[in-house]
Image (spheres, helix red, strand yellow):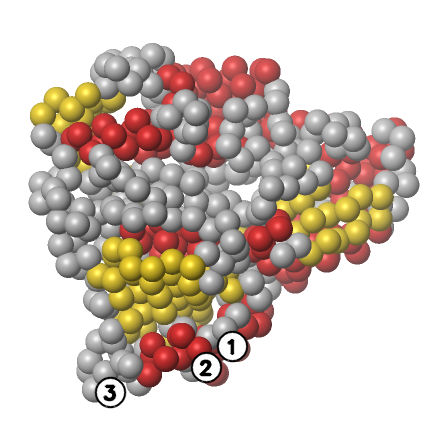
Amino acid sequence: MALGGATASLAGCSASSDAITSQLIHGATGGGLKDTLDPHFPVTMPDIARVRSLYEPLLRFTPDYTIEPSLATAVEHNADATEWTFHLREGVTFHDGRPLTADDVKASIERMADPKNPAALFSDIAPTVDLAASKALDDKTYRIKLKVPHSILDQVLASYSLGVVPRDFDVKHPIGTGPFRYESFLPGQRSHFVRHDGYWDHKAKVDSLLILDFGDDAAKVSALLAGQVHTIDNLPPYLASAIGQQGAHALVSETGGWVPFTMRVDQKPFSDKRVRQAMRLIVDRQQLIDQALSGFGRVGNDLYGPFDPDYLGTELPQRHQDIAQAKHLLKAAGHEDLQVELVTSPAVGSGGVESANLLVQQAAKAGVQVRVTKADPSVFYGPQYLQWLFAQDFWSTRLYLPQAIACALKTSPYNETHFDHPQFTELITSARRETDPARRRTLLQDAQRIEYDEGGLIIWAFANQVDGYSRQVSGVVPCREQPVSSYRFHLFTVKDQ
């Protein structure tokens, strides 16, 4: 990673000790030639950082992960949740100065629901949107009409990846309403944005934002300590205390994020449930937390969504390492001499590669030979992504139902395990339509029991998010959703030393 541009940018900052720097420089984990500025298709961490800087959804999550207004100040739905009405905020402008209108929301929903290419986290809803009946009621009111009920549409539309764009949006010249506007972009290397002076919320405290992609943790940390970047996401946890002695700080956030081991349930050997359960019993979860995460995490129980009020993971029997039972299951499945490749990448974030290497040792106790392949980020998230037999990935904090829709259905955009369970699908479909919270809770907990018993995810921990920032930076706060204060760079102040 060449850092000459970052160094040059810092050199141009004001010399006054009280002056606000002209530029915030962020070191992002991963990235590659397939990086994108598309608001509806982010994959890598640099993608997410860019999307959050340029665009905004109708609703958003607070640092403690509750929904609050964003471009919409209010939302309501009819009795069966087939009609949702959004009331837009006054005074919002796009980067080119045009005001946000309900027609822009209409065009954005139509783009998200494009039957040929629906937005990743809208793909489950897209076929149910009645585009002909969904319309702008006036300049600041938009109503979406659904063919079937959807009781949590507000949770879905609060996703960072469902930003509103103007009617004539062109990804080659991206325009949004976010705190920064596009200046330049070189996939796999850097992105340069400048402050949106017409921003409706807290205007950015820096003139510009530079995001640099890093495929190597050592280079990323070195850049922070050398003053070449101001913030980095996914600081290796074992450095959390050490960097304080070298001129930087660690930011630790309790999140619902997870870096799972993913097993494809549609291919041997993981098509046999006994093999999947054996692999779950091979894992020493606490050891992975202690060593791969340096203690920065909480034990997981193969279910996601720990902040969801309907989360069942703490009520079901906690899985612990049980080598004897794992051997028994493997022998019964005819795989007592199992050999399997595990594909990982630095792009999955802190603890990923480290936990993969530890799994090799843990699996050997059960006679399982795991061979780790460490793929370059551009390869891991390239054409083979979602096709790996046994791999890892990363997920940010989500509530249970939106997460299940994103990763556990045949139609899900990120179904790494190729999980396709008819009863589970029916439960999720019913829960999505159910407006009564008590009945929806029963449906969701029944679905969780199926994933716990038959799923292809090994969710060994909910990792605390550990990031790094320079002593020049203030305004950084813990957030449950995503790294570095959920990439709310506009809230940061950067002063010269």
**Which numbered dot is residue 222?**
1
Question: At 37% across and 80% down in the image, what residue appears?
Answer: 8
**Does residue 467 lie above or below 307 as drawn?**
below
Percent of width and height locating residue 416: 60, 36
Give the camera-side residue of 325 and 423: 423
Give the camera-side residue of 171 and 121: 171
Please report contact status of discs 1 and 2: CB closer than 8 Å, yes or no. yes
**Horizontally, is 92 left or right of 379 in the view?**
left
**Which numbered dot is residue 15?**
3
Which is more N-terminal, label 3 or label 1? 3
The amino acid type, in three-letter code, at marker 2 is Ala
Secondary structure under tag 3 reads loop
Question: At 24% across and 37% down in the image, what residue appears?
Answer: 168
Q: In which quadrant is the C terminus drawn?
A: bottom left
Q: Residues within 10 Å of mark 2 (few under 14, many from 20)?
A: some
Q: Is residue 87 visible?
A: no
